[in-house]
Image: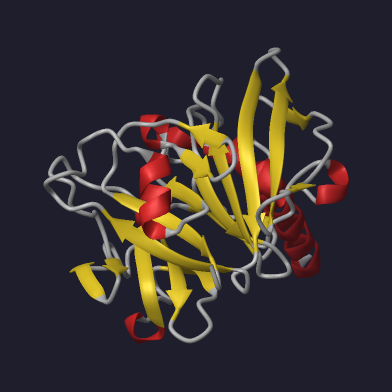
Amino acid sequence: MKRLLLLILGFFLVAQTAQAASDCPLKGHPLGDGGWTRSQSLPLDTRDVRIRFENGATARMKAIRLEHREFQIRLHWRNKTDWSMPIDFGALGEKLSAAVILNAGYYDENGRPLGYFRSGGKVFNSRVLYRGRKTFLHYGALFTVGRTEGRPNIVSRENFKDSRVKEAFQAGPLLVKDYKPVQGLSRYREYLRATRRTVVGLDAKDRLVVLVSEAETRGISWCELQEYLALPESEGGLGVRDAMNLDGGSSSQLWVRGGVEIPGRPAPTYIIAAPRGR
């Protein structure tokens, strides 16, 4: 009898987990986008992402993929005097020798970072918010750049160690970990709310993968993002190992030297990728 009860309990838990992993009300189907395209002028790949949903709406995003051996990845802080002014990506790209610029984490009305933020040897906010808590998962992860090789990484706030990074900021939630959607996000409104998103991830080869919603688009929810990010490339997804959500909505923006520009409202913090040796 005891064994039967354990089997029933095990079946219930498996069924409950499976349901939690696929409870998005709208199922997205990636459209044939031709996969990754190698840039003719930069050592990176681009991809036009289209996801069609059951109600006929389409989410449109731009994806970028690059290796840290080819790029120096760092954060850029726009100081208080100019962060609220419109940004000229071309001019900023020239100033920083950057090939890729995208918005980073959350900030308050005065342009101060919400959560930990280190850039250029300076710590702008030393607090790792909500460490030790099981809530506030929208601050559940940190994007970091290692001190030695400049390797990008995504870690939970519980595992973050300040001594090992030269650049880092806190945001979230953690969407994918070890190729699987992270559970526990369904309590948040954003789990089902479709809006513009900015996401960073890492694939099996430790390449940085960036995904940004286009300016005029349906948008995409956290749960829909999780399914697409974890879906293997052979099935039309991105197949990333780890991924985290950054600031989204009107803050979502991307610039790539050579023609890609997705505009957004001015922000104080950005992720920069500059070609090495140039």
Single out the residue that lies furthest toward the top: 56
- Residue 112 picture location, percent across and down: 18, 52
- Residue 231 picture location, percent across and down: 76, 47
- Please state if 277 lies on the left or on the right of 75 as rendered: right
- Please state if 27 lies on the left or on the right of 111 as rendered: right
Single out the residue that lies furthest toward the right: 234
- Please state if 96 lies on the left or on the right of 201 as rendered: left
Residue at the spot 18% in from the left edge and 47% down from the top edge? 111
Residue at the spot 79% in from the left edge and 68% down from the top edge? 3
Q: Is residue 74 visible?
A: yes
Quadrant of the image occupied by residue 182: bottom right
- Please tell me how many numbered marks the rendered image carries: 0
Of residues 9 and 174, the one drawn nearer to the viewer in this rendering:
174
- Residue 245 picture location, percent across and down: 48, 48
Does residue 266 sit above or below 273 in this rendering? Answer: above
- Please state if 59 lies on the left or on the right of 139 as rendered: right
Does residue 261 sit above or below 276 in this rendering? Answer: above
Q: Is residue 126 visible?
A: no
How is the structure coloured here?
secondary structure
Quadrant of the image occupied by residue 201: bottom right
Residue at the spot 42% in from the left edge and 42% down from the top edge? 90
- Residue 154 picture location, percent across and down: 51, 66
Of residues 101 and 164, the one drawn nearer to the viewer in this rendering:
101
* Quadrant in the picture for the N terminus: bottom right
Does residue 143 sit above or below 244 in this rendering? Answer: below
